[in-house]
Image (cartoon, rainbow, N blue to C red):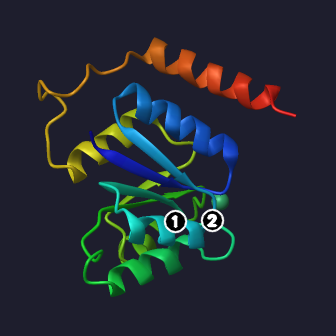
């Protein structure tokens, strides 16, 4: 099973990403800040790191820079996940050591497309669980939001 590490400081965003990834059969781990993300990757590298740009302790740029300095982790696929919609950000991100870019709110189609591209296997491959339908996804997302809202 492929493992995806979600490094994101916003619990709602983490939950939404987790739901999308789990219904597609990925194993998911989570980090709440850049320092924790770095420590987790060093201890057990995931197949892909989804890395928020704006995070406490170390931001996404600092995390990817440190990963690229480590020969063992230099080729780990890292996807930036960011709300920054300013023109030029995509270019800045792609020049900073990231392998891909997703803007928030993350669209499930773009997310799966990026993962398939980076894991270098076609979406139609038979070992993959079937693609969730749009209805399944919206149900999962609604459940995640409800679960989040119910927390004190
Ligand atoms: Mn953030």
Q: Is residue 17 above or below residue 133?
A: below
Q: Looking at the rendering, which quadrant does residue 50 occupy?
A: bottom left
Residue visible at 30% across and 21% down in the picture: 131
**Contact? badges 2 and 1 (CB < 8 Å):** yes
> Is label 2 within 8 A of ligand 1 (CB to nearest ligand atom)?
no
Q: Quadrant of the C terminus?
A: top right
Residue visible at 35% across and 28% down in the picture: 24
- For the residue pair 45 and 68, the one nearer the viewer reads as 45
Q: How many marks?
A: 2
Q: Position of residue 110 (x, y in %)?
A: 37, 41
Residue visible at 24% across and 71% down in the picture: 75
Q: Position of residue 73 (x, y in %)?
A: 30, 74
Query: Can you see residue 106?
Result: yes
For label 1, the residue is 37
Q: Which mark is residue 33?
A: 2
Query: Can you see residue 87?
Result: no
Q: Is residue 109 above or below residue 71?
A: above
- Which element is circle 1 on? helix
Residue visible at 68% across and 46% down in the picture: 11
Q: Residue furthest top?
A: 135
């Amino acid at each position: 099973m492929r493992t995806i590490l979600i490094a994101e400081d916003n619990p709602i965003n983490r939950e939404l990403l987790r739901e999308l990834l789990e219904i597609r059969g990925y194993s998911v781990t989570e980090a709440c800040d850049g320092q924790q993300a770095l420590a987790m990757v060093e201890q057990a590298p995931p197949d892909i790191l989804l890395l928020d740009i704006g995070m406490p302790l170390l931001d996404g740029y600092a995390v990817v820079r440190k990963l690229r300095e480590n020969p063992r982790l230099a080729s780990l696929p890292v996807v930036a996940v960011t709300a920054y919609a300013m023109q030029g950000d995509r270019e800045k991100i792609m020049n900073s050591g990231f392998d891909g870019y997703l803007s928030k709110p993350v669209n499930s189609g773009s997310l799966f497309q990026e993962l398939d591209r980076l894991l270098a296997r076609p979406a139609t491959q038979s070992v993959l669980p079937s693609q969730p339908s749009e209805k399944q996804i919206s149900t999962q997302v609604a459940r995640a939001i409800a679960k989040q809202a119910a927390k004190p």
